[in-house]
Image: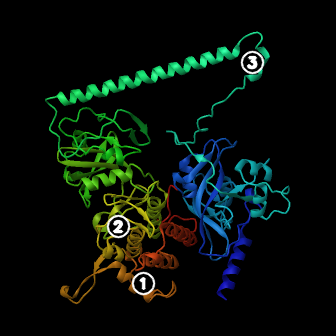
Amino acid sequence: MEALRISLAFSLLLLSWSPLPSASHSTPLNCSDTTRICTSFLAFKTSPATTPALIQSMFDTAASDLTADPAASPGYVFVRKNCSCAAASHMYFANTTFTVRDRDGPVFPMVSDAYGGLAFVPNTSRRAKVGAVIGLHLLCGCSSGLWNYLMSYVMAEGDSVESLSSRFGVSMDSIETVNGMNDPNNIVVNDVYYIPMNSVPGQPYYVNTSDSFSSSPAPAPVFYNISDDIRKHSSRFPYGWVIGSIGAALFLFAVVLVLCVSFKTLHCCRRQQKNRTKDPDRPTAHKFHILQSTFCYPSGRYFCCKSGTVKSSAGDTGNHQINIPKGVFADGFNMEKPIVFTYEEILASTDSFSDANLLGHGTYGSVYYGVLRDQEVAIKRMTATKTNEFMAEMNVLCKVHHASLVELIGYAASNDELFLIYEYAQKGSLKNHLHEPQNKGHTSLSWISRVQIALDAARGLEYIHEHTKTNYVHRDIKTSNILLDGSFRAKISDFGLAKLLVRTADGEASATRVVGTFGYLAPEYLRDGFATTKSDVYAFGVVLFELISGKEATTRTEGMTMANSERRSLASIMLGALKNSPNSMSMASLKEYIDPNLVDLYPHDCVFKTAMLAKQCVDEDPVLRPDMKQVVISLSHILLSSVEWEAALAGNSQVFSGLVQGR
């Protein structure tokens, strides 16, 4: 009966779906395995006004998930999305949300114009106001195993199976097989077709300071074939000899130029080394060396430098310098490097570390608010004994960049202190907004805000676990290390305990010393001292329980007297409540632990699904815990359902504050 009801509901949904003009006959791919999750791509046709930030917002993805095909006219951007088999419909979908930006009115023409046939809305009769967030399904697919990926492509005028085969380097038979085409000549313009791929399509896209796509990568060299001309005119003029002589001369000139530059650079370096050796006023070396380099070039929000010797742009650091053992930076920072600030700049920006600028106390130092070179920043102040933590954060944050990870801007040092400079998170930590927020001057978070924060943090963890060149485990995931920007979007911070994952035959493991915060530590990590990605998953499950309950990771139980009360982990308390809550309709026991600040404004089924996801994350057996990719998929579905719940509850009004703005 339940299966029949679900099938009927989905049939009604399809019947109620007024097809979008740009995708009049497109239908999702069928699937049977509802646990299936795969990587898919969507070919999105861009316009001159399209920016990377807009695409990231529309498809709810990161910059690292975008590649481009600048040679195509019009241009295409290929969007990487996790695709899953929907349990209710047994069809492949990826989910996203769309923010109404320009005008009030019907939803589906806006979606049609924006996505060009790649997305559809379940309720196309709905109208929305500017600022409303609409839940969308993206048409995607998972390969049956013959290919690595499927890419959703909207057929355009002039396209054919033959042209797509040539363009994407795949056989015509493969395209016809995937799409079940009996007649390859009978294609429908504006329909979505699925292109099988064995490699990631396109090239990494290039972003300039105007936040738009560059027209193309560097052009390939053009070779002009002059052999015919040489043969034609050889009797009148010795072109071959002339061209060969010119080429040889240019080659010799280039060799001489390189030798001269190399000699001058070597002479300069030796003279600088000699001057430093003879300088009687040079301060005595302390425990660390200052990072220096000669070649710096702007890269995004901070300067990236090649290995060498560079001084701070603000001038001489005087006696305030940091001495780091030779080779540490060469090994640790083989990619991008942050700005080196002077100690004097740090003092001035924080008003000499006044209490008025104190933001809080971290695990390994205090954090202060400052303004450096006209940019708001957060400055972590550490003692010089915290070298390992300092180097860990530098090693990780110089190499990983993601919208859900706090950005490292630079660093500075004095004789006995180290400083890390980060982008400033205007809304502070998640912890301050969950635990007694009114006492800390904050308003309580709505349910949708909580799910969005969880999804952002999950994406950040998934990125360092799976998508970086070298994978990391954070080891200190907790609500105080999840920061919120001005739009309440989450960023993971504090990588002082982060470790490189070591791949072994038995899996992955890192570290041999238990560090972190009690209440968030996985049982196997406490027992064996081996940190894995599943250790981070456990800690993230505790964060989910905190988002639901508003309670801290370790909490004191109620007792008749203070002597009878005891401290228990939130995970054990919430697991006990879930034992007596078999489903969303019978969750009276769980409801006792839902944050009263939500004042019953939440969808019961979404809260229950989030609690069950948290339960899976904190499973005693790490093998049974989901990975962060699966967590991201689950939270994406929960967010979409929550947005639809709010839309049904509030209609077109903005009475409820949970809508995510600016997306």
Quadrant for the N terminus in the image: bottom right
Residue situated in front as seen by the camera: 486 or 393: 393
User: Is there CB contact under 8 Å for labels 2 and 1?
Assistant: no
Looking at the image, is mark 2 or mark 3 earlier in the sequence?
A: 3
Dividing the picture into quadrants, the one containing residue 279 is: top left
Looking at the image, is mark 3 or mark 1 earlier in the sequence?
A: 3
User: Is there CB contact under 8 Å for labels 2 and 3?
Assistant: no
Looking at the picture, which amino acid does disc 2 mark?
Lys
154 lies above or below 629: above
Check disc 2 and report the residue beneath it.
478
Report the number of numbered marks: 3
User: Is there CB contact under 8 Å for labels 3 and 1?
Assistant: no
Check disc 3 and report the residue beneath it.
230
Looking at the picture, which amino acid does disc 1 mark?
Leu
- Residue 653: where, in percent of width, then height? 54, 65
Residue situated in front as seen by the camera: 383 or 443: 383
Q: CA distance from mark 2 to mark 3?
A: 73 Å
Label 3 vs label 1, nearer the camera: 3
In this view of the protein, can residue 289 be seen by the observer?
yes
| Mark 2 residue element | loop
| Neighbours of disc 2 within 10 Å: few (<14), some (14-19), many (20+) | many
Residue situated in front as seen by the camera: 78 or 648: 78
